Image (tube, coloured by chain):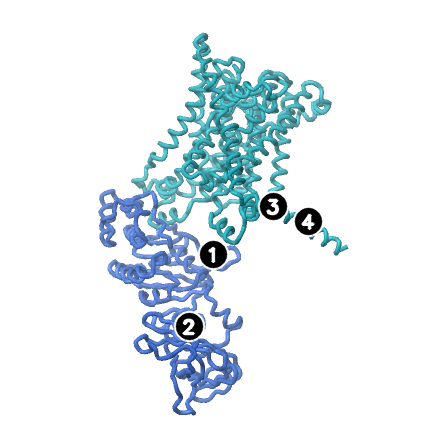
Chain colours: A cyan, B blue
Amino acid sequence: MGKQRSVVKHNNNVIGLGLTEKLDRLSSISLIKYLIYASSVIFFFAIIFFPPMVGILRNIGQIGVIYDDPNLLARANLAITQSFIMAFTVAILDLIAALPLAWFIVRSKTRIVNLIDTLVDIPFLIPTAALGYSSLLFWSSQSGISRIFGVESLVPPGFLLVLLLHFTFSYPVIVRVMVGELLNYKEVYEVAARTLGAQPLTAVRTITLPLLKPGIIASFLLAFARSLSETGATVIATGPWENGPVFIYRNVDKEGILVYVSSILILSSTVIFFLISLLAPKLRFPIRRAFPSIERKLSSSRAIKFRDSVTLLAFFLVVVAPSLFIALPMMGALLDGTLNEALSGLDPWNSFWRSMLISYAIGSLSTLLNIAFGLPAAIMIARGKLGRATSILEALVNVPIIVPSIALGVSLRLFWGEYGFLHEFWILLLSHTTITYTYFVESMAAAIESIPLEIEEVASTLGAKPFTIFRRITFPLTKYSVFSGAVLVFTRALGETGAAKAVARTKEFSTLPVLLVDWVVNKKATPSQSALGIGLYVISSFIILLIFRLLTRGKK
Amino acid sequence: MPSIKLVNVTKRYGNIVAIKNLSLTVNDGEYLCVLGPTGSGKTTLLKLIAGIIKPDEGEIYIDNKLVNNLPPQERNVAYVPQQYALFPHLRVIDNVAFGPLSKGFSRDEAYKISMQMLEMTRLAWRANSFPHELSGGMQQRLALARGLASGAKILLLDEPLGALDARLRVELRYKLREIAEENNLTTIHVTHDQEEAMVVADRIVILRNGEIQQEGPPPQVYNEPKNIFVAHFVGEANFFEGFVAETDLHGSWIQLRNGFILRVNETNKNVGERVVVMIREEKTRIIKRVRRKEEINLFPGTIREISLLGDFISYSILLDNGDRVNSRIPTIMGMGRFRVGEKVYVRLKPEDLRVYPYPPQGLYQELEVI
């Protein structure tokens, strides 16, 4: 018995060796290497970068029609302005609120830190469209907090509700980034400042924050981009108020005005992004003065307790409660027979299940595409394989996330729509790949960059061929980043409403978030059905994330 | 009067005890060197005094005032960490002015003091540079200037010269000492470089695994090491394993490996006890021929290696019983006297030999420095 097993094992080894040897030999041929890198560059330009640019440019002639309807034009311009006002407000609020919480998570020694740390991820795990509905019910409906205050609607749909909602879904991301920055920060500077006589607050204000500036700017831009781009949830919470994505959502058939709004959004968001990333580093913190007595008082343990309580209260009220509120109506829907109806697959549930299938198919396929073509691109960026052109490639890779995804979707529809033979499903897939590409490549590039180049160099002097280096060194060290990058892509693809709405021409190919937003906004389903549909959506994405967590457990 | 006193201080990190029931007094104006291998608790000791970490047990006094619960900004000590922690976003002058400004000095006053400190450390001409534009030695001086500008009279230096190249390290030692004296500072200087400690310190404390092994003025620590570890860590020494064979009124006979017999002057060990005998390398003599056969403590061996160390030549000799011995001879006296492979005798004078009990975990374990 034992003998047999060892024979089998032996055979496997031989087969395995044969294959890796073959791949090793292939990977040593420079032509093969160039082919792999070249194909990923071609993929980037042909699928990710040019389609949205060309789609808009080719149809720029249609812009003329906007003058036919001055009212619509005025509405469009207002919507674009509102987009940026909202994004700025949200990003500023995020920073103000996220810093104390991140601080609390990193520095506090109390036991609830672990709980808070887990709760922070919740809004991150719930697809934004579901979050939108949950917030709407929590703030605006009689089933939510309004009843406690005895008013019909505490926060009616409109600017304020959208602001609260955008805060809810962007806040966790910012906290995560800030926590990471704080963990990387060398506390020795702060410690040195304090031994020199600085009060804790003085040390933070004059030393820690200025040194964290790059991270703060990055968080600001992230929150800004998230707010600018979000469509599904915004449409649910918006009421009469309108920003760019909502305007596009509501006028998805009027091609001329869409080209106008989309091109303005794409152009202005790109310009604003580069302006902020160029100018913000020049901003100076007020660091030349100290106020020992005031800052001593503000550093007292009582002041810190007060700050922590306010932060945690705001966190629970504005982030945790509205995110989890959906659980209540969903429970109701489980008990009132809606579940049986859903399982029977009768109308409207047949389209629900179909959309779910489409969403998952698109999520997994776009993840695979991004891994296959994004990984070589990430290696190229991390290792500077393109020489000086590397930084240009990196800047271009970032474009898909700084542009509002629905505007990108409009452009992609115009581009791919030209090719009549392309089935709608493939257009959806390509669009989702485009909007998620950056997430994978950027996170992988960061992971690969963190491996010292010397390790790979040593491996090659020890006789390892490029493929072996990848298989034995680079991949094992970045395996978990590949997984988490894949999760990021998958959840983003699953949660995307804007681009999916803009691209889909027929109801037949609605992704799940598009269908659910349609249910809620256009009252295509009863509240009970909406609650259950959104609940199932949330639960299924939770399950996927859980599976990934289990697969990648024990390691970061 | 800036004095420092630690009473029965213990600090743990999880299961690791970094400082074990340690008591220590540093007098006003004293320059104390804490010497110990990596992981001996040196940095922890400094951080405890600076107030960056709190002791689990015991008390810390500064100027006879209990400071256990005083945060670092209230302690008025200048802590200079190993990598200096110069604020990278501030110019040289702003780095120095940070302390006075934080303590509420007016801008004019703060910058006046800072300029004085920069002049003292000969950095005034670089006042507007950023720290990363300075050389290693300048960064070191800047860290010092910054610490002193806050008006602290206690200076805590964590491996202050560790990041500098060898020559600069030697030059700056004296400068440190000079600055401490000129400003009447009480200084604790942590290092793992025994030569550095011997040169600058009024008093040396040898730390190992969070415990003080020995403390005293440098000559005392060097000449009368209390245990094998101190003997090995401070200066260069040879060790022999053996048993006490016989003891009389004036000394003892130690049985070494393979029948060699060694005479020592100490009588405080019991017959049959396992011991380690130590002799400094520079006291280990080599001679070519034996004149009188009856002479004691003369052992035959062969020269195996010769290394020139600058002022000294180090000879490595394999004794015929299998023990290895190193001997240091001033270069002007020893150059070219012996060749590799030459048969010689090693003479170990009884008055130069010290006897220690054999360490329970073995000699090599005991000598392990890191």
Label 1 secondary element: loop
Percent position (x, y) of residue A419? 56, 20
Residue annotated with mark 2: B231
How far across and how far down the image is residue A132, in percent? 55, 25
Q: Amino acid at mark 1?
A: Asp
Residue drawn 43% across and 25% down?
A269
Instruction: Point out the image quarter for the C terminus of chain A.
Output: top right
Q: For the residues tagged 1 and 3, is the chain the same?
A: no
Front tag of 2 and 4: 4
Q: Amino acid at mark 3?
A: Lys
Q: Which mark is residue A22?
A: 3
On the rendered structure, is A194 left or right of A396?
A: left
Residue underneath mark 1: B56
Residue count near mark 3 (Cα–Cα under 10 Å), binned few <14, some 14–19, many ≥20? few
Same-chain check, marks 2 and 4: no
Q: Which residue is mark 4?
A: A12
Question: Label 2 sits on what residue type?
Answer: Ala
In which chain is the residue bearing label 4?
A: A
Q: Residue at x 33, y 70 (%)?
A: B310
Q: Nearer the viewer, residue A159 or A26?
A: A26
